């Protein structure tokens, strides 16, 4: 469930909830991300999604900040600071207690101190990036991801 589903997106909340219910009833692992978090979202909106994820007993949990992509309504809106996203990740980890891992997207160092233990490497084009190869910019390649995890003393 994206933040402000059916308001900022064209997907109806009921459709998204039906999909979440189908995933859980089929016995699949549920990966859940509170996204895209921006300064326009109140803490109670974010908390509602934390509670929803907790109620679904998620396997993998994540948070992602909103990126001001050119050509979108939020292109000139500032992104959350790394510190603010880290605080949100920490609370999300505690509230949802994911069974397998806690992730943040895009990869950042500070959230690894707040319970994040999974990062995703990206390659190639990414609509949130101005570079053709996101691994050299926002997305981080595998070696950069490994370095972040090692610096936080995770075993790889």
Image: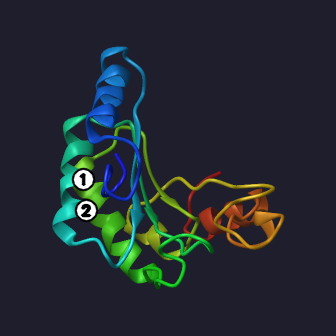
Is 138 placed above or below 142 here? below
State the image coordinates of residue 120 (x, y, percent, origin top left). 62, 53
State the image coordinates of residue 85 (x, y, percent, origin top left). 40, 73
Is 107 placed above or below 17 here? below
Using the image, tell me which numbered label, if any, was put on residue 91: none
Closer to the camera in the image, 43 or 61: 43
Q: How is the image coloured?
A: rainbow
State the image coordinates of residue 90 (x, y, percent, origin top left). 32, 66
Q: From the image, tell me which residue sits under label 2.
A: 46
At x 54% / y 75%, what residue is drawn?
Answer: 68
Name the mark nearer the viewer: 2 or 1.
2
At x 44% / y 60%, what residue is drawn?
Answer: 116
Is 101 placed above or below 113 here? above
State the image coordinates of residue 146 (x, y, percent, origin top left). 69, 60
Q: From the image, tell me which residue sits under label 1.
A: 50
At x 36% / y 28%, what residue is drawn?
Answer: 19
Q: Residues within 10 Å of mark 2 (few under 14, many from 20)?
A: some
Element at badge 2? Answer: helix
Quadrant including the N terminus: top left
Q: Residues within 10 Å of mark 1 (few under 14, many from 20)?
A: many
Element at badge 1? Answer: helix
Do labels 2 and 1 touch, CB within 8 Å?
yes
């Amino acid at each position: 469930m994206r933040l402000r589903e059916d308001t900022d997106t064209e997907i109806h909340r009921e459709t998204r909830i039906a999909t979440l219910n189908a995933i859980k009833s089929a016995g699949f692992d549920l990966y859940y991300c509170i996204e895209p978090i921006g300064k326009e979202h109140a803490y109670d909106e974010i908390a509602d999604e934390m509670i929803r994820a907790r109620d679904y007993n998620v396997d993998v949990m994540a948070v992602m900040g909103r990126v001001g992509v050119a050509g979108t309504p939020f292109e000139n809106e500032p992104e959350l600071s790394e510190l603010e996203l880290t605080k949100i990740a920490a609370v999300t980890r505690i509230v949802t207690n994911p069974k397998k891992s806690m992730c943040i997207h895009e990869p950042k160092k500070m959230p690894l101190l707040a319970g994040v233990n999974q990062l995703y490497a990206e390659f190639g084009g990414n609509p949130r990036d101005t570079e053709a190869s996101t691994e050299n910019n926002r997305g981080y390649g595998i070696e950069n991801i490994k370095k972040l995890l090692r610096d936080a003393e995770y075993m790889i």
